[in-house]
Image: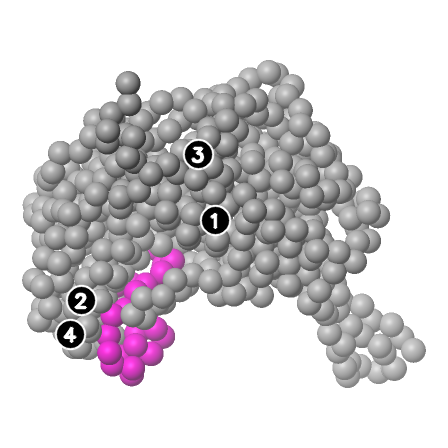
């Protein structure tokens, strides 16, 4: 019998379609065909809000990796793709964006089922971002130009450069923003004329699988896009080691990034790595405290803190410290935790029991080392993988909770009294990571000076989000290379110099 509360609950759009797709049969997409893995293996994927099983997913072995690489290499030699005009590549990518937009509610529901994020976040941020990434990069397909170069040596020369696709690209994406990250890698690679083998995270394969069905319907040439589901140890390692792969792009942990670098050395693959972060959020004494409080909370609690660029270290001038910390803690204590399918949920679960245990372990270690817990003590549901948003003060630079990436809703807040911007930057830079930084100030000079001094790939002042036109990547152990923008698509090309004696 249906309860009154359940009957009155607004239904998530296209949830039935998403659940039906999840419950269906899931194979590998290789060379334009759906095929079963050659060894018949599979793995389960789960709903992190309940811990319940969603589907069985095909697990690609080394033989399947070989088949996908062969299909991709064949596509690179096929005139249908190799000689396709840039405008036609752009048209195909735009058709994919249109198809994704036409099915946006289904993708949002599917993302929430598999990842746990609030469905509103999926529907109004993650999926629209993926659509915009596709359209932005489609525009680059017709703009990848070389240049003519005046030579100074003896003789009469016509010299120029060409930008050509790097070749077969293995793309390994994480579970925290599955579709948005997949689109950010697929779009520039296809726009540049590469052939793609995508491996989604084993925890969240469903939206990538659904996207592959759209790609099949649109009619990309066979082998241009291939999808292998599986784990990192077999499928991922098989791709990164494979001599037929020309480039690997990976988003995930710094530890795995090191493994990929070693594996890629066999044939000197091109590598792009977007790795961990420990983003500092700096609140100067002239900042608007209300906006800073809201921004600091959003920076760490969005997506349950499972964001590489999460603002996990909060530096607040002593004049505003108590006000800002109390404000962030109050937001944390009043956030609605629950299934992402509930309309009033503000923060969903973590992705898995292992991740929940990792995050709570960091909190315990911080408290054991002498930190003070300002929020996060409330009880949470034992169904699913929930962690209460947590604010800690009194952490020292030697503590693991302050030094290491946690990838959860845990904020370490520190005060500073110094007005020397170089010293403030030095403290914020005291990390192995350098992915992002956030500054809250109404002082234009201070904003520009800190932006120059902070060792981070992205500095945001007084809010702001990511855009496909802005290059994204990190300094230090936060990775190699850039994604998005001109730099992002040029990373999928090789530059060839041509000199002709006249």
Q: Which mark is residue 201?
A: none
Q: Is residue 450 magenta?
A: yes
Element type at marker 1?
helix
Q: Residues within 10 Å of mark 1 (few under 14, many from 20)?
A: many
User: Do callouts 4 and 2 mark residues in contact (Cβ within 8 Å)?
Assistant: no
Q: In which quarter of the image is residue 212?
A: top right
Q: Which of 80 and 12 is in front in this view?
A: 12
Is residue 300 in sight in this rendering?
yes
Q: Nearer the viewer, residue 363 or 32?
A: 32
Q: How crowded is mark 4: few (under 14 residues within 10 Å), some or many (20 or more)?
A: some
Q: Which of marks 4 and 1 is nearer the N terminus?
A: 1
| Separation (CA) of disc 3 from disc 4 | 47 Å
Question: In the rendered image of this protein, does residue 291 appear above or below residue 340?
Answer: below
Q: Which of marks 3 and 4 is nearer the N terminus?
A: 3
- Locate residue 258, reporting x and y percent: 46, 43
Q: Mark 4 points at which residue?
A: 285
Q: Quadrant of residue 328?
A: bottom left
Q: How crowded is mark 2: few (under 14 residues within 10 Å), some or many (20 or more)?
A: few
| Separation (CA) of disc 1 from disc 3 | 15 Å
Q: Name the residue under label 3.
A: 15
Q: Earlier in the sequence, mark 2 or mark 3?
A: 3
Question: In the rendered image of this protein, does residue 104 appear above or below residue 450?
Answer: above
Element type at marker 2?
helix
From the image, state whether disc 4 or disc 1 is nearer to you: 1
């Amino acid at each position: 019998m249906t309860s009154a509360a359940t009957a009155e609950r607004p239904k998530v759009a296209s949830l039935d379609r998403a659940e039906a797709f999840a419950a269906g049969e899931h194979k590998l997409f290789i060379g334009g065909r759906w095929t079963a893995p050659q060894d018949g293996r599979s793995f389960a994927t789960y709903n992190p809000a309940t811990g319940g099983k969603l589907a069985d997913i095909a697990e690609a072995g080394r033989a399947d990796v070989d088949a996908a690489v062969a299909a991709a290499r064949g596509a690179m030699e096929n005139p249908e793709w190799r000689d396709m005009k840039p405008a036609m590549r752009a048209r195909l990518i735009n058709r994919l964006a249109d198809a994704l937009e036409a099915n946006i509610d289904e993708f949002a529901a599917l993302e929430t089922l598999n990842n746990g994020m609030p469905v509103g976040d999926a529907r109004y941020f993650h999926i629209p971002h993926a659509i915009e990434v596709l359209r932005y990069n489609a525009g680059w397909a017709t703009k990848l130009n070389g240049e003519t170069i005046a030579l100074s040596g003896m003789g009469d020369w016509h010299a120029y450069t060409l930008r050509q696709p790097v070749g077969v690209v293995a793309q390994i994406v994480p579970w925290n923003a599955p579709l948005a990250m997949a689109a950010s890698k697929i779009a520039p690679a296809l726009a540049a004329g590469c052939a793609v083998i995508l491996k989604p995270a084993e925890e969240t394969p469903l939206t990538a699988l659904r996207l592959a069905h759209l790609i099949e319907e649109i009619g990309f040439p066979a082998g241009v896009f291939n999808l292998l589901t599986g784990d990192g140890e077999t499928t991922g390692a098989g791709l990164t080691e494979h001599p037929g792969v020309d480039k690997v792009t990976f988003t995930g942990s710094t530890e795995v990034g090191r493994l990929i670098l070693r594996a890629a050395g066999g044939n000197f693959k091109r590598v792009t790595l977007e790795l961990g972060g420990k983003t500092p959020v700096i609140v100067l004494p002239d900042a608007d405290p209300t906006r800073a409080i809201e921004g600091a909370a959003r920076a760490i609690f969005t997506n349950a803190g499972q964001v590489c660029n999460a603002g996990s270290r909060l530096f607040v001038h002593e004049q505003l410290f108590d006000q800002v910390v109390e404000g962030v803690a109050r937001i944390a204590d009043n956030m609605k935790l629950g299934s992402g399918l509930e309309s009033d949920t503000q923060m969903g679960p973590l992705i898995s029991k292992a991740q929940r245990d990792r995050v709570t372990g960091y909190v315990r270690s911080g408290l054991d080392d002498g930190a003070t817990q300002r929020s996060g003590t409330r009880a949470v549901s034992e169904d699913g993988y929930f962690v209460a948003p947590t604010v800690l003060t009194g952490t020292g630079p030697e503590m693991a909770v302050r030094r290491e990436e946690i990838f959860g809703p845990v904020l370490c807040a520190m005060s500073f009294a110094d007005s020397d911007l170089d010293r403030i930057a030095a403290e914020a830079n005291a990390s192995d990571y350098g992915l992002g930084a956030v500054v809250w100030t109404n002082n234009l000079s201070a904003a520009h000076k800190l932006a120059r001094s902070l060792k981070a790939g992205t500095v945001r002042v007084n809010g702001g989000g990511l855009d496909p036109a802005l290059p994204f990547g990190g300094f230090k152990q936060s990775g190699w290379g850039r994604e998005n923008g001109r730099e992002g698509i040029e990373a999928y090309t090789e530059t060839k110099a041509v000199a002709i004696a006249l």
